[in-house]
């Protein structure tokens, strides 16, 4: 696969004009801002010395009815009291419609579909996830500006590798709303790899294992000649440390033969379980104790017991890892290094399992909460032109294939999934009918051979094609995906130069489960799809043959005797019958029979047109 290189602004900056650039990890539960200072990336603390900002925003009204906001720890502190107006995990709603959020019913919010994406009712009105994210980003921007006592030049913001166009666009919109100049959106695993400086090290494959609070992501990166390429991604959007808290809470309750009855009880025991779990990352055993409505819950948990409880979950993550390796056609021992990201990778059981799986000790030197922000800061510093070390190349991949609908409802894949971005591909198409002056372009995303099983991204029409014989027009359709994963498609008729294009900014997103489903379906149905594709192609071919014969008959039918004409009509009718049946071979045979049966007629027509062309002309004029 040819790699497309991105060259970064390489001009060496005047040291007095150093531009302040930051990296922001806009996380589901936590967000951080980091910057390169004195040659090293570091996370910037708030006034209380805390680097983590909980990704939470609370809207409230003050005494005079004015809208106020609490962000981060202040918002979290009020979450139990004011759940409706305290928005957490907003990242899950970015670029999504209500229909994309299967667990919306279990959340305390009042959702409402707005143009583009879902909104949440609060005392301050309906808030879009973009607005809520912008509050978090603006808070971090303020923190950075206070730290440097200067304006920011720009920011690199990280997003999950599987984020689709809508989710990436929503993230950019949020940054813009927060007054940030987005230098680039960067995939989280790529940022983690940069933080470890893997781009300066040995070439090869690296795995990024990211187990957070609510999500698990696994990414494979290939480093060659200082260039990162995301080879494949996978994971589980509903698997993380929170699930371990639930399992531990249930186990503790069972051991004490108690129950968490009220919603308050359930919250309390979960908080205690999480605290105990985190303590067990450093200690051999810990007490889980809390006051429930039915009395005191108090049990001792050992690290081994927690490891046992977490095992099914950890095994599930390893199953995802296996899938991704299989997808990329590599073996675990071909992986050169494993980077651990996310708070849950502090658990020794997780480190041990991942280490055993890959047969090597994973990289854990950097703080797993900070590593993504640190990598983003290094990248931001480069993009701001502060680094004279030369260019830095980064590549990410498309999560799903992009293609076009062709005749017969089939998909012509233009850019296969896992192609590094930015990328551009073009393919030539032609017209199906004589005199066709317009071409409908339907852009789809997905792994299946049939349009109806792929996701429709955009439709547009190329008009004004000069009338030509079927198959004579050359229409070049170009796909271009920019560094942020946004797609533009253009179609151009090469002879006349008429052109039409569309930029795809889907108004709703695709959940990663949907992406996973589309991939899974694509794999399991591949053989069936191929058969179906062959049949559809045969139908298109038959249709083309019929159309050409009809045109010829209309123009030169008088060349045929009644018998010859009857024979051709019979062959055409035969195709019509076989088109309706699903028998591929019979249809192909009928099409071939018509082609054969009209050969003499075609020769006659050729003679006639040559005679006409020559009529009245001298030989030397020809
Ligand atoms: P996210 O990426 O989802 O925003 P984080 O990467 O911040 O989340 O990870 C949060 C998760 O990490 C929580 O489930 C938390 O309990 C867990 N965690 C944090 N510190 C530890 C620790 N010392 N041991 C085990 N788990 C931890
Ligand atoms: Mg994370």
Image (cartoon, rainbow, N blue to C red):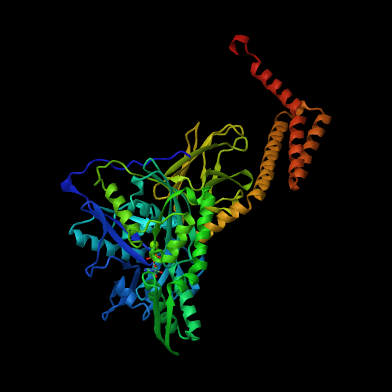
Q: Which of the 4 image quadrants contains residue 289?
A: bottom left
Compared with 567, 38 (above or below) is below
- How many numbered circles does the render carry? 0
Q: Quadrant of the C terminus?
A: top right
Compared with 603, 396 (above or below) is below
Question: In the image, what residue occupies the spot 51% across and 82% down?
Answer: 254
Q: Is residue 54 visible?
A: yes
Q: Nearer the viewer, residue 365 or 137?
A: 365
Q: Nearer the viewer, residue 212 or 289?
A: 289
Question: In the image, what residue occupies the spot 40% across and 68% down?
Answer: 89
Location of ligand 1 given as a quarter of the image = bottom left
Q: Residue furthest left?
A: 16
Q: Residue furthest bottom?
A: 294
Q: Position of residue 330 (x, y in %)?
A: 51, 48
Q: Position of residue 360 (x, y in %)?
A: 43, 54
Compared with 614, 489 (above or below) is below
Q: Position of residue 29 (x, y in %)?
A: 38, 67
Image position of 70 (left or right of 411): left
Q: Nearer the viewer, residue 380 or 329?
A: 329
Question: In the image, what residue occupies the spot 43% across and 69% down?
Answer: 241
Q: Is residue 116 visible?
A: no
Q: Position of residue 518 (x, y in %)?
A: 56, 55
């Amino acid at each position: 696969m040819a790699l497309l290189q991105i060259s970064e602004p390489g001009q060496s900056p005047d040291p007095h004009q150093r531009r302040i650039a930051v990296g922001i990890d806009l996380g589901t539960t936590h967000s951080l801002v980091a910057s390169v200072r004195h040659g090293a990336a570091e996370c910037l603390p708030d006034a209380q010395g805390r680097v983590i900002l909980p990704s939470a925003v609370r809207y409230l009204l003050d005494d005079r009815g004015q809208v106020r906001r609490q962000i981060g720890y202040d918002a979290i502190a009020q979450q139990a009291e004011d759940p409706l107006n305290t928005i957490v995990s907003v990242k899950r709603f970015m670029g999504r419609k209500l229909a994309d959020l299967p667990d919306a019913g279990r959340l305390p919010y009042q959702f409402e579909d707005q143009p583009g994406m879902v909104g949440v009712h609060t005392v301050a009105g309906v808030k879009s996830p973009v607005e809520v994210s912008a509050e978090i980003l603006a808070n971090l921007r303020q923190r950075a500006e206070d730290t440097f006592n200067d304006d920011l030049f720009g920011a690199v913001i990280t997003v999950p590798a599987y984020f689709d166009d809508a989710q990436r666009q929503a993230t950019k919109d949020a940054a813009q709303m927060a007054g940030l100049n987005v230098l680039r959106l960067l995939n989280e695993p790529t940022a983690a790899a940069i933080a470890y400086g893997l781009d300066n090290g040995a070439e090869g494959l690296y795995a990024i294992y990211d187990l957070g609070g609510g999500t698990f992501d696994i990414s494979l990166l290939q480093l060659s000649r200082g260039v990162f390429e995301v080879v494949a991604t996978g994971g589980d959007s509903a698997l993380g440390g929170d699930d371990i808290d639930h399992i531990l809470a249930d186990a503790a309750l069972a051991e004490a033969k108690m129950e968490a009855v009220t919603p308050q009880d359930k919250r309390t025991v979960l908080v205690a379980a999480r605290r105990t779990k985190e303590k067990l990352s450093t200690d051999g055993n810990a007490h889980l104790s809390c006051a429930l409505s039915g009395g005191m819950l108090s049990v001792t948990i050992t690290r081994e017991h927690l490891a046992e409880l977490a095992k099914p979950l950890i095994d599930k993550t390893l199953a995802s890892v296996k899938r991704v390796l299989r997808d990329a056609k590599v073996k675990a021992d071909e992986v050169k290094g494993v980077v651990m990201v996310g708070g849950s990778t502090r658990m020794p059981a997780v480190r041990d399992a991942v280490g055993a799986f890959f047969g090597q000790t994973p990289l854990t030197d950097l703080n797993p909460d900070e590593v993504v922000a640190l990598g983003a800061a290094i990248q931001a510093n480069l993009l701001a032109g502060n680094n004279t070390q030369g260019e830095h190349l980064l590549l990410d991949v498309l999560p799903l294939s992009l293609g076009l609908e062709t005749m017969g409802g089939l998909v012509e894949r233009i850019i296969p999934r896992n192609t590094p971005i930015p990328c551009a591909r073009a393919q030539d198409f032609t017209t199906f009918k004589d005199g066709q002056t317009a071409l409908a372009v339907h852009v789809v995303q997905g792994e299946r051979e049939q349009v109806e099983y792929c996701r429709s991204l955009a439709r547009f029409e190329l008009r004004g094609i000069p009338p030509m014989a079927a198959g004579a027009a050359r229409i070049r359709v170009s796909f271009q995906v920019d560094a942020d994963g946004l797609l533009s498609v253009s179609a151009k008729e090469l002879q006349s130069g008429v052109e039409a294009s569309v930029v795809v900014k889907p108004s709703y997103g695709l959940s990663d489960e949907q992406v996973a489903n589309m991939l899974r379906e694509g794999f399991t149905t591949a053989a069936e799809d191929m058969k179906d594709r062959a049949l559809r192609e045969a139908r298109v071919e038959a249709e083309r043959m019929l159309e050409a014969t009809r045109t010829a008959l209309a123009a030169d039918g008088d060349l045929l005797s009644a018998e010859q004409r009857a024979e051709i009509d019979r062959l055409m009718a035969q195709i019509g019958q076989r088109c309706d049946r699903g028998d591929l071979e019979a249809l192909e045979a009928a099409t071939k029979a018509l082609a054969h049966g009209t050969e003499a007629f075609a020769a006659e027509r050729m003679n006639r047109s040559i005679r006409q062309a020559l009529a009245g002309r001298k030989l030397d004029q020809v």
